[in-house]
Image (cartoon, rainbow, N blue to C red):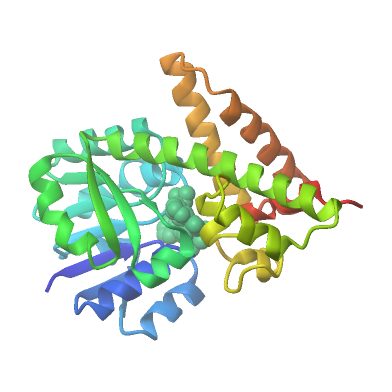
Amino acid sequence: MASIGFIGVGNMGGPMAINLVKAGHQVKVFDLSAELVQQVVAQGAQRAATVQDAACDVDVLISMLPSGQIVEDLYIHQTGLLDHINPRTLVIDCSTIAPENAINLAQAAKVKDIVTLDAPVSGGVGGAKAGTLTFIVGGDKSAFEKAEPILRNMGKSVFHAGNHGAGQMAKICNNMLLAVHMIGTAEALQLGVDNGLDPQVLSQIMLQSSGRNWSLELYNPYPGVMPNVPASNNYDGGFQTNLMNKDLGLALEAALKSQSSTPMGYLAKSLYGLHGRKGFGKKDFSSIQKMFEKD
Ligand code: NAD
């Protein structure tokens, strides 16, 4: 069993850290929110007194943070956490950030003989709780092989996408597609409801037809159709609209660089941007359903 430091125990990091505890690892956790730390400590983790304490003297350090700026500030700039990490510690950043942020971290770490991996995840809060996440990893193959057994304690699929930043690039492509099919699902459901259909029945029909997709199958955005999803919990918990907006921004930045054409991603970014400005920034991204609702 490994000793593991875990930084960022929010919607995703909390259940991921708990699954590591359940797998028998010694887990030290840190978050800016003492309340969130307490929830993980109650499940058997140790409380790290400081972020440096979480990072020192562990086999593996995992971070699950909101943005690339925060990741770079933590490891490289403001906090300079890399100065406190032993070279034997493998650093796995699971946050969704730009490939450039992941490459910057890998290069700054290499100067100090520290090995990093970018390992963003897919599967949402439900997947984090159930331990069924998909990990999309970028970095050296040998480090990937070392990380894989640990990641399998939190997920059921672990992919090596390529070198540093490749994990992030694959994740960004996935989330652009997720945004597009979530919006498409929401507008189709509202069209049906506006024309007298029951959203539950319509969902069942589309699930057995060619409109089937992940949003419909596991994350139905229409309130009351599916239990245990944010739509049936006033769109609380889950994946914030603000975070989806961040990921769509990363997709558009990548598209600009590679001169790729991403018209659906561009439209999704506009719609999610507007949705965030209308007060839904901290609500789950499936709340885009509300945009289509009749007044
Ligand atoms: P969240 O806001 O619930 O959690 C982030 C946590 O990081 C918070 O608890 C916050 O207090 C903590 N934090 C911020 N700065 C910190 C610092 N400097 N030191 C220590 N802790 C700090 O967000 P989340 O939904 O858990 O998402 C985390 C990451 O996972 C994001 O990059 C997101 O894009 C990605 N992601 C989220 C989902 C999802 O469904 N929520 C799915 C896949 C990927």
Residue 136 is situated, as x and y percent measured from the top left of the image, at: 30, 46
Which quadrant: the N terminus?
Answer: bottom left
> Horizontal placement of 232 versus 50: left or right?
right
Relative horizontal placement of residue 45, taking residue 67 as reference (left or right): left
Residue sitting at x 67%, y 67%: 225
Q: In front: 127, or 26?
A: 127
Which image quadrant is residue 72 in? top left
Q: Give the farthest residue toward the right.
A: 295
The structure residue drawn at horizontal position 21% and vertical position 67%, both measured from the top left corner, is: 4
Residue 192 to residue 236: above or below: above
Please name whichever residue, 265 or 31, is drawn nearer the observer in this view of the structure. Answer: 265
Q: Is residue 12 visible?
A: yes
Q: Is residue 255 above or below residue 170?
A: above
How many numbered discs?
Answer: 0
Quadrant of the rendered image containing residue 169: top left
Residue with the most extreme top position: 259
Q: Position of residue 217 (x, y in %)?
A: 53, 58
Left or right of 72 on screen, residue 239: right
Residue 180 percent coordinates (x, y): 58, 39
The residue located at (52%, 61%) in the rendering is 218
Inspect this view and state whether residue 78 appears: no
Q: Which residue shows up at 65% across the image and 29% down it?
A: 267
